[in-house]
Amino acid sequence: MHQPEYRDLQTGEFKLPWTYLHVIKDYVDMAAHLEAVPKAKAVVNFAPILLEQIEEYARQVNGYLHDQISITDPLLAALVDPSIPANPEQRMKLVKDCMRANRERQINRYPTFKRLIEMADWLEHHYDSLTYVNSQFIGDILAWYHLIWMGETIKLTDSRIKRLIEKGSGYTLHDRIEIIEVIAEQLTSIICRYKALARKGQVELSVTPYAHPIMPLLLDLNSTHEAMPDAPLPELDTYPGGDERVKWHLDKGVQTFKRLFGFKPKGCWPSEGGVSAQTLKILGDFGFDWTASGGSVLHNSLSLPENGKKPGIHHPFKLQETDIACFFRDDGLSDLIGFEYSKWHADDAVGDLIHHIENIAVHEVGDKVVSIIMDGENAWEYYPANGYYFLSALYERLAGHPSIELTTFSECLQHSVEVKPLAKMVAGSWVYGTFSTWIGDADKNRGWDMLGDAKWTFDKVISAGRLTDKQVQQAELQLAVCEGSDWFWWFGDYNPGEAVSNFEKQFRLNLANLYRLLEEEPPAYLAMSFTQGSGAPAMGGAMRPGVELT
């Protein structure tokens, strides 16, 4: 799981609410499904920058409940604000924020909330009528929004949430405070729940580099051309000091992971499954036993003449001159879960998946490791009941299957699963086996050039020695945030307009904050938008299949 840094690190304000919303909806449910089936096993990856945000949300929400300390997430603060804003623009902002949910699975499921959203749709086109919208409408839409984002396991077991959903309207401040009490409980306990699952051996916890950068691109922008020979590149020839930055992210990420979980992880999921020969070498030297990437990366690599006879794909591989095993995602099975099974009856979907795995067992020689790797939590909002029925059936049936064994990557290596040799690798990611999601078009390349400008300024100021140790540390953290993968993911007109706007604004804010921390004037271009979206990609663009559809 990962979310980028949504805070303005200079003010502490959360600009987008996705971290706490995904905690209460997805991270809670995913833990509960494993807890309910003790024989189930999984690998769960956490981005360190996500863990820090969860920690900060827990601190703030408990601070509000115990000492009335203000919350710096505007939407969460509005939930418990005794006074609904009178300003029409502020009211419309809250209304629009409460419309950001899956229409079919989250909004339409609840007729009362659906009716509120239909009113909100009308208000968007009749702005002057906001004057006549009372505070109860705003209070109800805030309450309902947080209720629909609750995980299915919470809705089924928490009497407070059951009662508030049944109430339907007329929510009071007391009701809204009850909702935030539930949110506080989930934020406070979620890291401990995964830690307990790891201690029992049900879960292997792994880590990504601290702020989720695409390591191969930081190391060598030209690695883009290994899978996309004709892709245009930024004006930036190479990311300055990329090798040192990758090692900084790995070191900082492991430090954060150890502080929260108490041990060093054996595995590293490289951000976006981004790998290259140089990346694997660094990960092995860093002491990781395993890493993983997309099946298309393996397919591209096995097509090279250097790799000779083509072995079966359901094995870990080790690239020559590296000391780390690399597992590869079964893109077909993973994408069935991500993009198709949400439309099926849960039992039929699980049965189909098991049938595919049984076929692999029959038709491939020797031991097989089928790696089903999901893009975080994004699939479940497209399933009925947040994937509750699918995930319940999946874990129960796989855990009880006579010939399929649920395991973890470290257990595979401990049990001496055969690791196949790989003479040469084609650099790429889990998305299409390329880096096209993050580089190679005009807007993404412009983002890299802007980041490169900031890094040159960072290097110049640091080498001049005019900052204090504290200022250097703040600037390093701010630079790390700017290097995250998510900003580049959303650049480009094929993405939805609102998402592009939100992430592009945050990227420019992050860069401007970096310049100010360096006591330099931000370039004028950071005041201007450089990318807009008008597309409607599958699943809203938050997920991509592993294989590019043609």
Image (cartoon, helix red, strand yellow):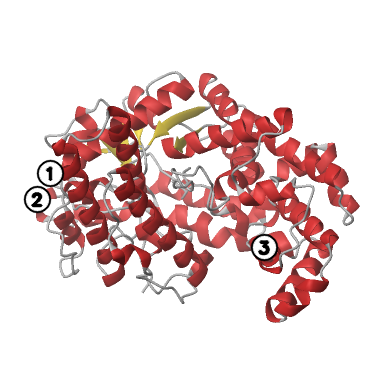
- Secondary element under disc 1, as helix, strand or loop, is loop
Q: Secondary structure at mark 3?
A: helix
Q: Residue at x 46, y 77 (%)?
A: 534
Q: Nearer the viewer, residue 384 or 437?
A: 437
**Closer to viewer: mark 2 or mark 3:** 3
The tally of labels here is: 3
Q: Which structural element holds mark 2?
A: helix
- Residue at 22% over, 57% down: 300
Q: Which residue is mark 3?
A: 90
- Residue 183 in the image: state x and y as whole percent: 69, 39
Q: Going from the N terminus, do you reach mark 2 or mark 3 first?
A: 3
Q: Amino acid at mark 1?
A: Ala
Residue 463 versus residue 171 in the image, above or below: above
Q: Do residues under tags 2 and 1 come within 8 Å of each other at their CB atoms?
A: yes
Looking at the image, which is closer to me, 9 or 222?
9
Query: Label 2 sits on what residue type?
Result: Glu
Q: Is residue 240 left or right of residue 122?
A: left
Mark 2 vs 1, N-terminal side: 2
Residue located beneath label 2 in the image:
306
Alpha carbon of mark 2 to alpha carbon of mark 1: how far? Answer: 6 Å
User: Where is residue 521, by image quadrant?
Assistant: bottom left
Q: Which mark is residue 423?
A: 1
Locate residue 371, reporting x and y percent: 41, 43
Compared to 268, does 501 lie above or below?
A: below
Residue type marked 3: Gln
Q: Residues within 10 Å of mark 1 (few under 14, many from 20)?
A: some
**Residue in the foreground of this view, choosing between 391 and 163:** 163
Residue 381: horizontal and vertical position, in percent? 61, 56
Q: Please tell me which residue is depicted at 73% across the width and 71% down the height of the picture.
A: 120
Q: Indicate whether 190 appears above or below 142.
A: above
Q: Is 336 in front, or is 266? A: 266
Crowd class of label 3 (few under 14; some 14 to 19; many from 20; radius 10 Å): few
